[in-house]
Each structure stands twice: as C-alpha cells, then as structure tokens.
Image (cartoon, helix red, strand yellow):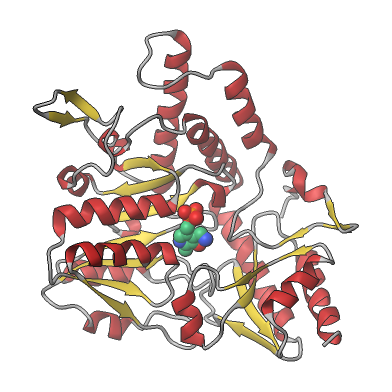
C-alpha cells in the first residue's frame, strides 16, 4: 500500500504527547489536502449562489455544482443525474425518503422491513412515518455472528410488504449484507428496497445497478468529503411519482397563490440554496479515492480487518461483536468487565481515538445484551502499526483493572 498519509495533514498531529492513532473512521473520515483546498479555493475565488445568476461567478459555481452531480452519478453507477439528489447527509436522505415515499406509496396497514442491525437514522424516520400513516415495521433478524437471516427475511414478506430498509455495511458489526440477493427477493415480492450505503461507499466499489436497489443514500463526510453534504439516489420512475419533501426556492417551476408547479428532477427535492461548495468538495473527494481505486482501498481495509480480528482476538477477555468473515472496516468489542467508556477514555490518553457507546444502534446493543461497545474503524490511511498500537493500548488498560 502506497503511503497516502501525507495527503492528510491532521494525521501527523499528536494527542497527549502521543502520535495520533485515529480509529474512528466510521464516525467520520479525515480530509485530504485537496478537499480542504477545494473548499477554501471556491470561497476565495468562485463563490456565488448557484442556478439563479446570469453573472460569471454564478455560472462558474453552478458548473462546479452540476459537475459534482455527474461525478456522483458515475461513482455509484446511476443512469441519470436526475436520480442524484443532494442532501445534508444520509440522515436527511432517509428522512426525505420516508416522508416523500411514504406520502406517495404507503397506506395504513402497509408493512416495511428493517434489519436488526440498522443505525437509528434508518429506524426512527420509519417510526415517525408509522405514527403518521399507521404502517407497521417488521424486524429482519440476524445471527449471533451478525449476518442477516435470509430465510427469515423472505418469510417476513406478505402482500402488504412495500419496502425493505437495510444497511449495506453495518456501522457496528462491519457485516457486508447481501443487498443484491435481498433486492432480488424484495422485487420478487413486489416490494422496493432502500440501501443505507453510509458505511459501504467509503470502503468498496458500490454500484446501484449491480445492487439493483431502488434507493440508496450516503454521506460525504464518511468518504473523505466535507460535512453537511450527502446524496439520495432514487430510481427516476419512482422519484417522479414522489411529492417534494420541502418547499422553497430552487424546487419550483412556477409559483402563484392559486397553484404552484415543481421543477424537474432532481431539483424538485432540493429546496433552498444547496451546499454548492460542499458538493464540489465531495466530488474532489470522490475523484481522490477513484484515483487510488476503490478495489485497492477495499483490499487494503479487508487485510486490516482480518489483522485486527486476529490481533485483538488474542487479548484476554476480548469479546468481538460481528464475526462473519464477510465484514469490512469495523471491529466492535468489549474487554472483560471494563466499561467501554473507561476503555475509550484511557485509550484516548494514549493518543488512540476509538468510539464508545451504543453507536446509534440501541436495538443492536439489545440484541447482544450489552449497553455499549468500543469500536475501532479503519480507512485507506490506517496501518497495521496502528492496530498494534490499539492492541498494546488495550492490554495496558486491561492491566489497570
Ligand atoms: N447509517 C449508517 C450505517 C451510519 O453509520 C451513519 C453514521 N454513523 C448514518 C446512517 C448517519 O449518517 P449521517 O450522520 O452522516 O447522516
């Protein structure tokens, strides 16, 4: 693996006098210099509001913003830029989907399927919809090793099942779910499928055509891009039938007090001034990882994951959650009776950043009978030396208890 660490200035800082070991990449990744510079360059030399101005800067900013949409389209293999809706992130993408899809397609008594390993952002918006619409939510169970139970999944379908909501990769277990197969089954039952790709897009090639999903979402900040920008992909034929999520400027064709008509896709779903600097910087991030190669990044992180599973597995009292071989980039664990918060706090004193807590997946914590876990998560710049540092850090902390 070529050393890409020099592209990320923050990685050379120290924490409490120790070199930073940043293992919280599932929460957010660090940003390469090219992304940070794209943001400052645009504010310094291009900045103007998009879509509305005839003047030079507005045209230039609009060109960058729309070029970013095309970059995203290519990156995820969508057919048309009409299918790429810019949002604030995965969470907003799912809220948009729940509200708008719910309005167009769901009626009282309809059912949706949600897996037991979902992030709260792929649970709560559907519960809000349940309160509004009277739909029901059925949970797709998982095995102890953290895999979707495919037979059970298929047996949950009824003639009222409309939509499946599932993470491509779990932010806790790291399981790579068989979303292609799940899509095939959903479609055979006349249902749609939404894939939460927040934890897959940064780590492996993701192609919406291969997955055959109807909707997909991801966040810019987890794929080396800026915060505050994300994407909702949707099949054009479905987005066409869905009503706007928010009203305002940009999303209208014509407004009068009697009647308002909406813009064409994807603008119908993009009310107000978009984060056009963010979308451009996201495109720079996607170009950056494309140049390295997503296959290459996937291989590197698969090796790191294997190494971490083996190395951490040797520690006395270690309990690792998510033991399927088909996992990527994340290792969640507890050690003996040490509280995960104590473990995280003491590791931090050694310069090692891991996440602790429920990881926005409380139903999954309940599934494993724990309140929380510590979690190490990797990125293209993570090294085996950092995993060694983590393992040695845990051993050191464990001795204190
Ligand atoms: N889904 C998954 C699987 C995630 O890991 C996350 C972030 N931890 C989200 C959704 C929410 O992403 P965001 O906070 O960027 O909206």
Residue projecting furthest to the right? 17
Location of residue 48 with respect to 28 vertically, above or below: above
Res. 200 visible in picture: no
Observer-nearest residue: 206 or 154? Answer: 154
Residue at point 50%, 68% (across, down): 360
Location of residue 112 by image quarter: bottom left
In this picture, residue 275 sits left or right of residue 251: right
Q: Residue at x 20, y 57 (%)?
A: 102
- Answer with left or right where residue 76 lies relative to residue 130: right
Quadrant of image for the C terminus? bottom right
Which residue is nearer to you in this view: 274 or 304? Answer: 274
* Residue 217 x/y as whole percent: 39, 53
The quadrant of the rendering that contains the N terminus is: bottom right
Rendered position, 302 above or below 152: above
Could you say where residue 287 lies in the image, as x and y percent from the top left? 54, 38
Single out the residue that lies furthest toward the top: 55
Compared across the picture, whether 102 is left or right of 312 comes to left
- Identified at 29% across, 85% down, the residue is 152
């Amino acid at each position: 693996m070529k050393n890409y660490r020099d592209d990320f200035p923050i990685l050379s800082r120290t924490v409490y006098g120790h070199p930073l070991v940043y293992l919280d990449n599932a929460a957010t990744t660090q940003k390469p210099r090219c992304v940070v510079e794209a943001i400052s360059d645009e504010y310094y030399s291009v900045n103007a509001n998009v879509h509305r101005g005839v003047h030079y800067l507005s045209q230039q900013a609009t060109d960058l913003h729309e070029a970013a949409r095309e970059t995203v389209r290519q990156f995820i293999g969508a057919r048309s830029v009409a299918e790429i809706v810019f949002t604030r992130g995965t969470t907003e993408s799912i809220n948009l989907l729940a509200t708008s899809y719910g309005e167009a397609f769901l009626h009282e008594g309809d059912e949706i399927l949600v897996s037991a390993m979902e992030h709260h952002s792929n649970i709560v918006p559907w519960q809000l919809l349940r309160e509004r619409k009277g739909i029901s939510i059925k949970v797709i169970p998982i095995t102890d090793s953290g895999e979707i139970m495919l037979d059970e999944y298929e047996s949950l379908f009824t003639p009222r099942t409309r939509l499946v909501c599932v993470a491509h990769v779990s932010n806790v277990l790291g399981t790579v779910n068989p979303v292609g197969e799940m899509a095939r089954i959903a479609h055979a039952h006349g249902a749609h499928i939404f894939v939460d790709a927040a934890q897959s897009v940064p780590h492996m090639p993701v192609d919406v055509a291969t997955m055959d999903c109807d909707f997909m979402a991801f966040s810019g900040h987890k794929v080396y891009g800026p915060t505050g920008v994300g994407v909702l992909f949707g099949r054009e034929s479905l987005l066409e039938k869905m009503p706007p999520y928010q009203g305002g400027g940009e999303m209208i064709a014509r407004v009068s007090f009697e009647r308002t008509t909406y813009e064409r896709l994807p603008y119908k779903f993009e009310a107000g001034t978009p984060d056009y600097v963010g979308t451009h910087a996201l495109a720079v991030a996607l170009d950056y990882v494309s140049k390295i190669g997503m296959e290459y990044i996937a291989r590197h992180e698969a090796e790191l994951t294997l190494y971490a599973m083996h190395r951490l597995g040797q520690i006395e009292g270690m309990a690792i959650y998510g033991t399927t071989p088909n996992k990527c980039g994340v290792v969640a664990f507890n050690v003996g009776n040490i509280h995960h918060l104590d473990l995280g706090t003491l590791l931090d004193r050694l310069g090692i950043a891991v996440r602790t807590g429920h990881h926005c997946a409380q139903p999954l914590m309940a599934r494993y009978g724990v309140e929380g876990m510590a979690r190490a998560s990797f990125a293209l710049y993570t090294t085996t030396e950092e995993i060694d540092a983590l393992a040695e850090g845990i051993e050191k902390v464990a001795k204190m208890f």
